[in-house]
Amino acid sequence: MHDKPRSEASGLRLLVFQHVDVEHPGIFREFWRDAGIAWDAVELDAGEPIPDLEAYDALIVMGGPMDVWQEDEHPWLVAEKAAIRRFVTDLQRPYLGICFGHQLLAAALGGVVQLGKVPEVGPGTVELTQAGAADPLFAGLSTPVRTFQWHGAEVASLPAGCEVLARNDACAVQAFRFGAMAYGIQYHVELTDVTVPEWQQIPAYAASLETALGPERAARLADDTRKLLPDFAAAARQLNDNFLKVVTASATSTAKVM
């Protein structure tokens, strides 16, 4: 038997910030394993320390049941925002924030995050803006994009240097880019067959689910979502491939400078 050829991304090292153990990179873990990519996860809610940021080619920040303004309840948010700010402004390296990670990017850079009018939960769609359709992150993805949502807060005002890449009627900032390669995505792309059942066990998520969908639709969410997993997986692979191209180009450029 022959080993699989290693991808161009195989030398990359990724850092992942997590805020609850069931909100991890999901299906991206399979993609990264197949590509031979090394990655480290830091469970911030469990008190794990943030490592040396300069050792990593990209920062991926996942979702969580807390809100960006809850620094009294979650003091580690202060250090996390500072790390995000340093990574994207001082080091100028690629960033991908999903849901809470999307909101944290905006908050860390001086934007405004607040509760939305109603929680947005379950399958839906977003429309790419003109800038989004032309952005490398969404190459190969046609609009409208089928998505999965689970959030109660939203980015209400973007900081300077940002561009909206996707939107829908429920939330005006579904995706944005800061600078050349720091991205925030409000919706979830990392779903697997166990994502919804695991998230339904989190009290804050269960409450938002029933508020958004009502008891009957909430009870059907796992089954309804499972039918869409092949489409979600294909979109996740495309977005992952696109992001890794951005990271590879950045890492190559950085190596030439050093």
Image: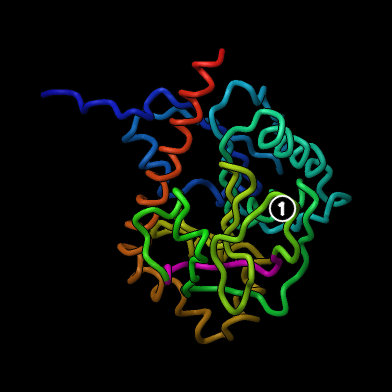
Mark 1 nearby-residue class (10 Å; few <14, some 14–19, many ≥20): many
Q: Residue drawn at (85%, 49%), measured in percent from left and top?
A: 71
Q: Residue drawn at (38%, 53%), measured in percent from left and top?
A: 139
x, y percentage for residue 91?
Answer: 66, 28
Asked whether 210 or 136 is in front, the reply is 136
Asked whether 6 or 163 is in front, the reply is 163
Q: In this view, does 47 lie to the left or right of 202?
A: right
Q: Please, which colouring scheme is shown?
A: rainbow
Q: Mark 1 points at which residue?
A: 106
Q: In this view, does 169 lie above or below 88?
A: below
x, y percentage for residue 118?
Answer: 68, 79
Q: Residue drawn at (73%, 58%), measured in percent from left and top?
A: 158
x, y percentage for residue 117?
Answer: 72, 79
Q: In this view, does 72 lie above or below 170?
A: above
Q: Residue drawn at (74%, 39%), measured in percent from left and top?
A: 80
Element under label 1? Answer: helix
Residue extending furthest toward the top: 258
Q: Is residue 179 above or below residue 195?
A: above
**Quadrant in which the C terminus is drawn:** top right
Q: Is residue 145 magenta?
A: yes
Which region shows up in magenta?
A: 144-154
Asked whether 87 or 201 is in front, the reply is 87
x, y percentage for residue 78?
Answer: 82, 41
What amino acid is at disc 1? Answer: Ala
Asked whether 199 or 133 is in front, the reply is 133
**Quadrant in which the N terminus is drawn:** top left
Q: Main secondary structure of the magenta part?
A: strand
